[in-house]
Image (tube, helix red, strand yellow):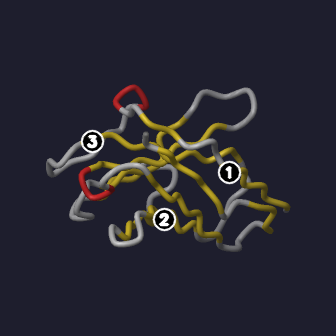
Amino acid sequence: QVQMVESGGGLVQAGESLRLSCTVSGTTFDGYAMGWFRQAPGKEREWVSCINWSAGKTLYSDSVKDRFFVSRDNAKNTLYLQIDNLEPEDPATYYCATEPHTGTGCYLSQYEYTYWGQGTQVTVSS
């Protein structure tokens, strides 16, 4: 059974950085595409970034491009999201998601992912 646990969220000041982690267990991690999503209170879940199984392909939403950086360490079964220069619109619960896929791409739609973590909350103080 695939299990995913996010960590690294917290309260930070605007302009600071944060690194989120997502540790996966119960499966062969390097056979999966991974995604990050976020959901702010009262809003729809929003795609943030994704990375293919080999880390050869990464994609970002326009709202986070050049501030967020996704990576993975397949030896540690861990996905990361480095968030730089946090902005007031970034507070949300951040979720990682995964789906078996050994192709060159990754998925932007939440409906393509089967497995999800429980989320980690990011709060930004001005």
Residue under pointer 2: 80
Image quadrant assignment for residue 123 = bottom right
Q: How far separated are the C-alphas under marks 2 and 3?
A: 18 Å
Question: In the rendering, at what x and y percent does residue 23 appear?
Answer: 50, 59
* Amino acid type, residue under disc 1 in the picture: Thr
What residue do we see at 50% from left, 45% from top? 3
Q: How far separated are the C-alphas under marks 1 and 3?
A: 23 Å
Farthest right residue in view:
126
* Amino acid type, residue under disc 3 in the picture: Pro
What residue do we see at 45% from left, 53% from top? 25
Q: Is the C-beta separation of discs 2 and 1 under 8 Å?
A: no
* Amino acid type, residue under disc 2 in the picture: Tyr
Q: Is the C-beta separation of discs 1 and 3 under 8 Å?
A: no
Which SS class for mark 2?
strand
Q: Is residue 76 left or right of residue 123?
A: left
Image quadrant assignment for residue 112 = top left
Residue under pointer 1: 120
Task: Estimate how packed mark 2 is, as few (under 14), some (14 to 19) or many (20 or more) residues with alpha carbons within 10 Å.
Answer: many
Q: How far separated are the C-alphas under marks 2 and 1?
A: 12 Å
What residue do we see at 69% from left, 38% from top? 40
Earlier residue among tags 2 and 3: 2
Q: Is the C-beta separation of discs 2 and 3 under 8 Å?
A: no
Q: Residue 23 versus residue 40: which sits nearer the camera?
A: 23
